Image (spheres, helix red, strand yellow):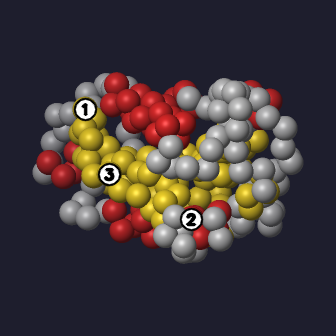
Amino acid sequence: MAPGLRLWVIAFSLALSTGAMAATEPALPGEGRVEYFGVTFPLLIGDAKRVSVENKEQAGRGLNVVYAHDLTETTIEMYPASRGKVPDDVNGPVVRREFNNHRQNALYARSAGADIKLGRKFTLVDGHKVPRLICQTLIISHGHMSGPPTDRLSDYYICMGAVNGQFIWTHTMLKHWPDPEPVVRRFLGALVKQVWN
């Protein structure tokens, strides 16, 4: 990932998580259990390994956990609404509004020489067919670099849900190829099973 694009992703991942909360102090990345507002983030989710944990509650930004899988990483953030508990309904107005905010911020944010367009939208359900995560692909073009057009593209997947009164947001970036979505879906499916078992 280009340094400018990595900085944009880091800045974007911090932009919307606001509010304050009290919670259990999470473990270090190498320790076995990380529990936050009743959700456990184990060392492994499917074949993905937890590589970092950061408790940002003192800065009002909840918990940030990163899993490495399939030559990429997915960041999971849990954080509160600015007021009240978040209803556990991905089709409700609170989650949809937050999802749309993340998506619009991604579309408006421009790294040097990069353009961002909407890709496919999809929903992930739990074992009871209850929708748990709404997701959107964003296709990022890295400007006028040499090489085939597909070498200039990355896919950025954002997903939003709610659990135990908190927002849960994931984001994954990986190189564009004919069909990268199954890579992301495999991890997200395992995450849904872990969080909403």
Disc 1 versus disc 3: distance between alpha carbons?
18 Å
Q: Would you name the residue on which mark 2 appears?
A: 192
Is 83 positioned to the left or the right of 150 in the image? Answer: right
Q: Determine which quarter of the picture holds residue 49.
A: bottom right
In x, y percent, where is residue 196? Answer: 63, 65
Tell me which residue sits at (53%, 68%) in the image. Answer: 126
Q: Would you name the residue on which mark 3 appears?
A: 121
Disc 3 versus disc 2: distance between alpha carbons?
17 Å
Dot 3: what SS? Answer: strand
In depth, the one of 182 and 86 nearer the eye is 86
Counting residues from the start of the chain, the first of labels 1 and 3 encountered is 1
Q: Determine which quarter of the picture holds residue 108.
A: top left
Tell me which residue sits at (52%, 64%) in the image. Answer: 130
Disc 2 versus disc 1: distance between alpha carbons?
30 Å
Dot 2: what SS? Answer: helix
In x, y percent, where is residue 25? Answer: 86, 47
Which quadrant does the N terminus fall into?
top left
Counting residues from the start of the chain, the first of labels 3 and 2 encountered is 3
Q: Would you name the residue on which mark 1 appears?
A: 115
